[in-house]
């Protein structure tokens, strides 16, 4: 794990770490891993900006339980995460942050129908939220429903910057998965470079893997990791593993005390 979520830190730090992770990989996503390392300064200030207003209004005990659930999720201790969410729901049920975290647990466990149910429930609370929509698209990609995943990612309203790079990376994967080289190449050629994340390098690696050029693909991975580091690129690597191109490796957050 890239840093310890110490008890003295504000709830906002832990939850923000979780939300960043999920955004990268349904699931991911552990902005502890950190694709969105640019937000670290704000996180270090203990900001609660990533918490929903309803969670903040539910009080410090509720927010502490959400923080503990997020910490457990990052460490892939899903039973503990669910237990903490159950305790939080006894204080105030059916709040957005709890619902999204529970959905992400089910997604990681490959219990996709349950995950979809909870993400859709989250959208009834915040219809314009990027997070549930991204993760619904991500689940399609995880299930290798490439055409549906590509459509879902392309329909997202994405802000510029790292989020845009991430979604473009996912579109490239989905297009390659269904054999649409033209679309994959089009998106790849328009990705930002120099990039703010490892997305550009890993998208090029995906292209090379899809065309049987493993050595070139590994060169792209090594280049991306030399610039952004293994931990920050973990979610991109994990996506390549989902595609069957590389062997999965342990999350930097897993097993961290």
Image (tube, rainbow, N blue to C red):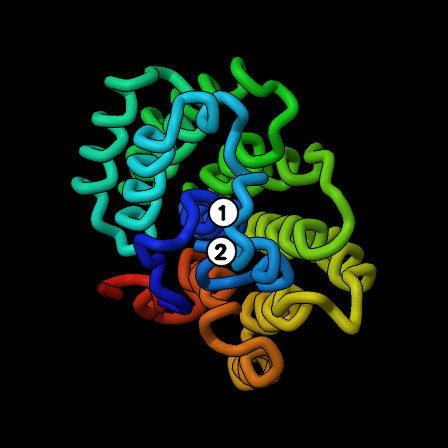
| Callout 1 crowding tier (Cα within 10 Å): few <14, some 14–19, many ≥20 | many
Q: Which of marks 2 and 1 is in front?
A: 1
* Front-lying residue, 89 or 148: 89
Describe residue 82's horizontal placement relative to residue 138 as left or right.
left
Residue 83 location, quadrant: top left
The answer to whether any part of residue 211 appears in the image is no
Marks 2 and 1 close (CB-CB < 8 Å): yes
Could you say where residue 146 lies in the image, as x and y percent from the top left?
Answer: 55, 43
* Front-lying residue, 210 or 22: 22
Q: Which mark is residue 31?
A: 2
The answer to whether any part of residue 138 appears in the image is yes
Residue 191 location, quadrant: bottom right
Depicted 31 relative to depicted 23: above or below: below
Report the residue at 49% width, 56% height from top: 31
> Considering the image in quadrants, where does the N terminus appear?
bottom left
Could you say where residue 241 lies in the image, as x and y percent from the top left?
Answer: 41, 63
Describe residue 211's horizontal placement relative to residue 10 as left or right.
right
Could you say where residue 204 lies in the image, as x and y percent from the top left?
Answer: 65, 70
Say whether disc 2 or disc 1 marks the residue closer to the N-terminus: 1
User: Which residue in the structure is indicated by mark 1?
Assistant: 16
- Label 1 SS: helix
Could you say where residue 236 lies in the image, as x and y percent from the top left?
Answer: 52, 63
Describe residue 21's horizontal placement relative to residue 163 as left or right.
left
Report the residue at 50% width, 37% height from top: 135
């Amino acid at each position: 794990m890239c840093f310890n979520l110490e008890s003295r830190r504000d709830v906002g730090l832990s939850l923000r770490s979780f939300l960043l992770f999920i955004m990268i990989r349904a699931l991911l996503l552990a902005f502890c891993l950190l694709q969105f390392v640019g937000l670290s300064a704000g996180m270090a200030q203990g900001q609660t900006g990533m918490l929903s207003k309803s969670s903040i209004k539910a009080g410090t005990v509720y927010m502490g339980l959400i923080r503990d659930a997020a910490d457990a999720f990052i460490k892939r201790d899903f039973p503990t995460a669910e237990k903490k969410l159950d305790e939080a729901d006894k204080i105030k049920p059916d709040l957005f942050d709890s619902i999204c975290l529970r959905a992400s647990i089910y997604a990681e466990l490959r219990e996709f129908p349950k995950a979809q149910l909870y993400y859709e429930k989250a959208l009834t609370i915040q219809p314009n939220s990027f997070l549930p929509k991204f993760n619904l698209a991500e689940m399609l990609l995880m299930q290798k429903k490439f055409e549906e995943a590509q459509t879902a990612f392309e329909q997202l309203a994405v802000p510029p910057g790292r989020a845009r790079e991430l979604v473009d990376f996912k579109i490239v994967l989905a297009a390659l998965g269904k054999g649409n080289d033209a679309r994959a190449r089009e998106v790849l050629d328009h990705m930002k470079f120099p990039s703010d994340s490892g997305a550009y390098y890993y998208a090029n690696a995906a292209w090379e893997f899809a065309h049987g050029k493993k050595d070139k693909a590994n060169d792209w991975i090594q280049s991306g990791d030399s610039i952004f580091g293994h931990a920050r690129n973990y979610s991109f690597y994990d996506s390549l593993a989902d595609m069957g191109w590389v062997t999965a490796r342990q999350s930097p957050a897993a097993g961290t005390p």
